[in-house]
Image (tube, grey):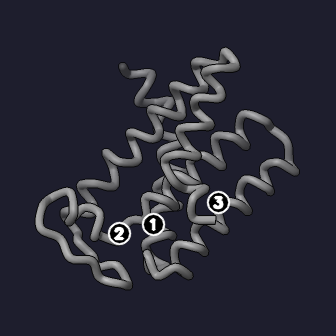
Amino acid sequence: MSALGGSLVFLSIALSFALLGNIDRAMFLVSGYLLTYLIAAPLRLGFFKERPEKRQYKNLFERLDAASFPSIHAQRAVFLAVTLAGYFKNTGLTVLFLLLAGLVCYSRVALRKHHLSDVLAGSVLGAAVYYLLPVIMGLL
C-alpha cells in the first residue's frame, strides 16, 4: 500500500494524463508533486523529528530522508486522491481514492516509517496543496 504514495505511481498517473492529451491536469499533478517537496523539505530540516525506526545520516539529503515529519507519502497520496476525486467527480471513485490514501497513511505507521502525527500533518498538507496550487499557478 505504501507504494501508492510513492513517486513512481504518482508520476505514472501524471504521465498517463499527458499521454491522453490532458496536459493541464498532468502539469497540475507535477506542480503539486514539486510543491509537496518545497513544503515538506524545510519542515523536515527545520523541525527534525526521528522516524520510529531511527536512521543514520551523514549529509543533508540523508538527514532529509531520515526525518519523519511530515510524511511526504501521506502528503502525495492525499493530494493525488483529492485531485483525482475532483477530476472524476464521482462519489464512488472519491470514496475509493480517499480510502486508498487512508491505507497509504495507515501503512506508513504500520511499517514504522512514521508516527501518526506525521501522516496526519502530511494529509493536511496534501489537501492544502490541492487548494493552494490553483492560486499559486494563477500568480505565475
The residue that appears at 58% across and 54% down in the rendered structure is: 78
How far across and down, in percent of the image, does residue 134 sit? 50, 30
Q: How many circles with numbers are drawn on the protein?
A: 3
How far across and down, in percent of the image, does residue 48 sit? 23, 71
> Of helix, strand and loop, which one carries label 3?
helix
2 above or below 107? above
> Of helix, strand and loop, which one carries label 2?
loop
Label 3 belongs to which residue?
101
> Which residue of the protein is positioned furthest toward the left in this rendering?
58
Label 2 belongs to which residue?
69
| Callout 1–callout 2 Cβ contact below 8 Å | yes
Estimate the spatial distance between the alpha carbons at disc 3 and disc 1, rounded to whole Å: 13 Å
Estimate the spatial distance between the alpha carbons at disc 1 and disc 2, rounded to whole Å: 8 Å
Q: Which of marks 3 and 2 is nearer the N terminus?
A: 2
The residue that appears at 65% across and 66% down in the rendered structure is: 102
95 above or below 89? below
Q: How crowded is mark 2: few (under 14 residues within 10 Å), some or many (20 or more)?
A: many
43 above or below 139? below
Q: Which amino acid does label 3 sit on?
A: Ala
Residue in the foreground of this view, choosing between 7 and 71: 7
User: For residue 131, which numbered disc appears in the image?
Assistant: none
